[in-house]
Image (cartoon, grey):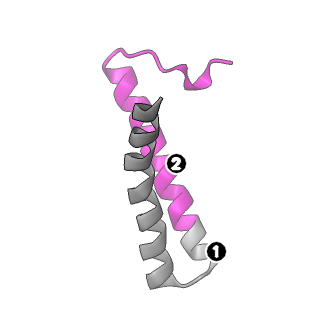
Amino acid sequence: MIKRYLIYTALFIPVALLYVVLEHYFGDSWLTVGIFVVLVLGARIGLLLYRRSKGIHDSWFDG
C-alpha cells in the first residue's frame, strides 16, 4: 500500500511541476489549462499505443 502511494507521488510531482511552469510562463489562463490537458491526453494516448504495440492488454477501457 505504501509502495503504491510512493509511486503515485513520484508520478504526480512532475505533473504538478509542469503545471506550475506553464502557469508561470502563460499566466493563470485557459491557455495554460489547454496546453496541460493536451499534454496529458497525448501522454495517455502514447502509452496506449505503446502498450498495444508490445501486446500488453490495457484495462483502461474495460468496464
Q: Amino acid at mark 2?
A: Leu
Q: Are marks 1 and 2 in contact (CB under 8 Å)?
A: no
4 versus 34 height, above or below: above
Residues in magenta, as a range? 34-63
Q: Residue at x 48, y 68 (%)?
A: 19
56 versus 43 height, above or below: above
Q: Is residue 30 left or right of residue 5?
A: right
Q: What residue does disc 1 label?
A: 30
**Label 2 crowd (10 A; few <14 / some 14-19 / many >=20):** few
- The x, y position of residue 54, in whole percent, is 30, 19
Query: In which image quadrant can residue 55 be found?
Result: top left
Cα–Cα span, label 1 and label 2: 16 Å
- The x, y position of residue 40, in whole percent, is 49, 52
Q: Earlier in the sequence, mark 1 or mark 2?
A: 1
Q: What residue does disc 2 label?
A: 41
Q: Camera-side residue: 22 or 3?
A: 3
Q: Secondary structure at mark 2?
A: helix
Q: Amino acid at mark 1?
A: Trp
Q: Camera-side residue: 35 or 21?
A: 21
Prevalent SS, magenta region: helix
Spot the residue most to the left. 54
The answer to whether residue 42 is magenta is: yes
Query: In which image quadrant can residue 17 be found?
Result: bottom left
Residue 5's disc is none
**Label 1 crowd (10 A; few <14 / some 14-19 / many >=20):** few
22 versus 58 height, above or below: below
26 versus 10 height, above or below: below
Q: Residue at x 35, y 30 (%)?
A: 50
